[in-house]
Structure formats: C-alpha cells, structure tokens
C-alpha cells in the first residue's frame, strides 16, 4: 500500500466534519475571484468577501495548521486546494517581492494621501518630511492648505477640485474635473496633464464614494445583546456597503473609457474605499498596474481607522512607467497612511 493509498486517507467522523467545513471555507474564499466576473449591481455579496478576506484567510491558515498536526497527507491535500487563496492576501501583504529587481534610477516620485481634512496636528509636517515631485491629496480642500502651500511648497504648481488637491514640481498644462453624469455621487475625480520636460503624463486623482460606516455603527454590533439588535445593525452596514459599491460601479463605468482614451501615460492615485480583490480594484487593475505590488514589501495596510488591516489607497500606472520603489509611511496623522511610489518613465 502506498503512502497516498485510499486507506491512509480514512478519517473518523469528527475529522470528516472538520474537512467538510474546511472545504466550505475554501469555497467561500475562492468567491473573491468572482469579482472579476460579476458587478455589484449584479451580485454585490462577492464584494463583501474582499472586505473580510484577511479573516477568511486566517481561518484557512488555522485549518492548515490543524491538518499539519493531525495528518500530513491531508495537510498536503488541503495546501494544494488552498494555494489560490494566497494571492488575494499577497495583494495587501507582499512580504517578499520577487519582482523587485530593477536597478534603474527613478526620475519621478509621487505621493497619494487621504489627509482626513488635516484634522490631526502633524499632518502637514508629515507631507513636508516626505516631499515628492507630485503630491495627490484626498479629503483636502483648498482653504485648508492655502497658507501652508504658500509657506512650505514654494515652486509647486497646485490645482484644487472640492476634496481633491494636487501639488506638482512640474507645470500642469491641462486639467479638469472628470464629471459624473450617472447618479448623484459624493466622490470626486479630476485629471492633470503634467509636462515633465521630456514627456507629458496624465495624472488622475480619484476619491471614490465613501461607505459612511463609522466606528459607532461597528460598535453597535459588538455591544449588541440580542440577535435582533445584531441583525438590525448588520443590515444597516449591509445597506451602506451595497449602496457604496453600486455608486463605485457607476463611477467606474464612466472613468474606464476616459482612461482608455488617454493620449498620455497614466498615473492614477486613489482612495478607492475598496480592498484588493474587490470589483473596483479588479476593474482598474485590468487596465492599469498596481504600483505597490510591483515593488512594495511588507504590510501594505493604508487605513487604520477601524483597528482592522485594510488596504484601500493605491497608485496605479500604465505601461511606460516602471516602479523603482514603493512604500507606505506608517505615521498616524490621519486615518489613512500616505503611499509613496518612485517611478522610472521610459521614453
């Protein structure tokens, strides 16, 4: 009898139950890939998986540890079946980046940062200590930073659109808001054509519609004493999530054609209000590349407002750009962390 014979895989009743539950968890985990196929309008619930994926993946790892201790044969089987669950978590935690091999020298640095309205002391100083060639800000109005810009960003060209700001060392030769014609949306998008001297690039600043899920709503679920209270609070969160995801889909339906028609290489900075593996992420990543994944390493979490690891702030780029360095500045002067990417733009 071989080491993988049928008799060697026999399990008692309890472990058959464990294996069944394991398979169900894996099935749920793999539904994250259906965000490549179904939109939130069609089926929003697959997008929920992307939000809670770190928890699902943690459960997958617990099952692997269980089988490693109980049966190495079942461990190998479950490890093979679980292999596809590692990539979505890698999009937030590229612990070791195998593609980070470039020896090119960067010729452009870009920051994207949701400043949370500069509510926290030290936010301006955080930007000043990490100045880049192009600074893209969300939740930052002109009147909140006008004096700071005059005092600290001398020589930068600046443009403002409601909650969006850009500061650039290079001339901004054309700019406009990317207006949304479908629905009354609360997010914003604008583009900026920038003359680098040797080439012109198009930079898009995108603040995707927020979900309006605050800490109080999350605490309501934690502090609920009855099933009815939990259900009521959960339905509120579900409703807000679905509404936000549908608005995101409307935004992307008009933004994607704009991206495809661009006459210049594109950089897109965004507080996407969506996690890796989501419909929103998959849509943008099908036309542009996720800059942080090209060269970033370690914890890619960019939002810490809920004490739960979430990556929702991104830089995307088109093919003429090569990512040289990518990092998250883990300083808590906003509920978001700044993301800084250094690029080499090839002629």
Image (cartoon, grey):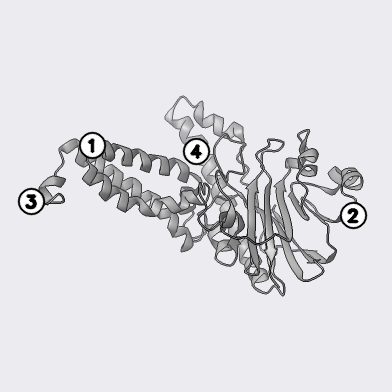
Between 222 and 69, the one lying in front of the other is 69
In front of the other: 38 or 296: 296
Labels 3, 1: front one: 3
Marks 3 and 1, the one that precedes in the sequence: 3
Q: Residue 343 in the image: x percent, y percent?
A: 68, 60
Mark 4–mark 3 distance (CA, rounded to whole Å): 52 Å
In the picture of the structure, the residue carrying the numbered disc 4 is: 234
| Label disc, if present, on residue 70 of the rendered structure | 1
Q: Position of residue 295 (x, y in %)?
A: 58, 55
**Residue 143, quarter of the rendered image:** top right
User: In the rendered view, does 107 fall on the left or right side of 172?
Assistant: left
Residue at (55% x, 50% y) in the render: 275
Q: CA distance from mark 4 to mark 2?
A: 49 Å
Identify the residue position indicated by label 3 in the image: 1
Please name the residue that numbered disc 2 is placed on. 155
**Which tag, 4 or 1, sits closer to the chain's start?**
1
Q: Residues within 10 Å of mark 4 (few under 14, many from 20)?
A: some
- The residue positioned 70% from the left and 38% from the top of the image is 334
**Mark 3 neighbour class, 10 Å CA radius: few under 14, some 14 to 19, many 20 or more:** few
**For the residue labelled by badge 4, is the local secondary structure a helix, a strand or a loop?**
helix
Q: Is residue 23 left or right of residue 200?
A: left
User: Mark 4, mark 1: which one is toward the viewer?
Assistant: 1
Q: Position of residue 187 (x, y in %)?
A: 69, 53
């Amino acid at each position: 009898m071989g080491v993988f014979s049928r008799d060697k895989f026999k399990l008692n009743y309890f472990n058959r139950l464990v294996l069944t539950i394991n398979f169900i968890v894996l099935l749920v985990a793999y539904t994250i890939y259906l965000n490549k196929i179904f939109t939130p309008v069609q089926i929003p619930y697959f997008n929920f998986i992307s939000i809670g994926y770190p928890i699902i993946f943690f459960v997958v790892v617990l099952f692997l540890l269980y089988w490693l201790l109980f049966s190495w044969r079942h461990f190998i089987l479950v490890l093979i079946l679980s292999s596809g669950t590692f990539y979505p978590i890698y999009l937030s935690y590229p612990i070791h980046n195998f593609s980070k091999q470039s020896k090119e020298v960067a010729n452009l640095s870009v920051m994207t940062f949701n400043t949370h309205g500069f509510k926290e002391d030290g936010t301006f100083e955080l930007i000043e200590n990490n100045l880049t060639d192009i600074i893209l800000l969300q939740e930052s109005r002109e009147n909140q930073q006008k004096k700071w810009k005059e005092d600290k960003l001398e020589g930068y060209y600046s443009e403002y659109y409601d909650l969006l700001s850009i500061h650039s060392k290079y001339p901004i030769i054309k700019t406009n808001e990317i207006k949304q014609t479908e629905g009354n949306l609360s997010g914003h998008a604008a583009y900026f054509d920038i003359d680098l001297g040797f080439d012109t690039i198009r930079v898009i600043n995108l603040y995707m519609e927020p979900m309006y899920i605050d800490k109080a709503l999350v605490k309501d679920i934690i502090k609920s004493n009855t099933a009815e209270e939990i259900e009521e609070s959960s339905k509120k969160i579900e409703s807000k999530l679905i509404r936000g995801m549908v608005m995101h889909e409307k935004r992307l339906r008009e933004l994607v054609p704009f991206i495809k028609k661009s006459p210049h290489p594109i950089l897109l900075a965004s507080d996407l209000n969506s996690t890796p593996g989501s419909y929103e992420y998959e849509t943008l990543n099908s036309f542009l590349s996720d800059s942080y994944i090209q060269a970033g390493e370690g914890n890619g979490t960019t939002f810490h407002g809920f004490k739960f690891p979430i990556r929702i702030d991104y830089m995307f780029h088109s093919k003429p750009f090569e990512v040289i360095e990518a990092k998250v500045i883990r300083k808590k002067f906003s509920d978001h962390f700044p993301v800084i990417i250094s690029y080499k733009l090839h002629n």
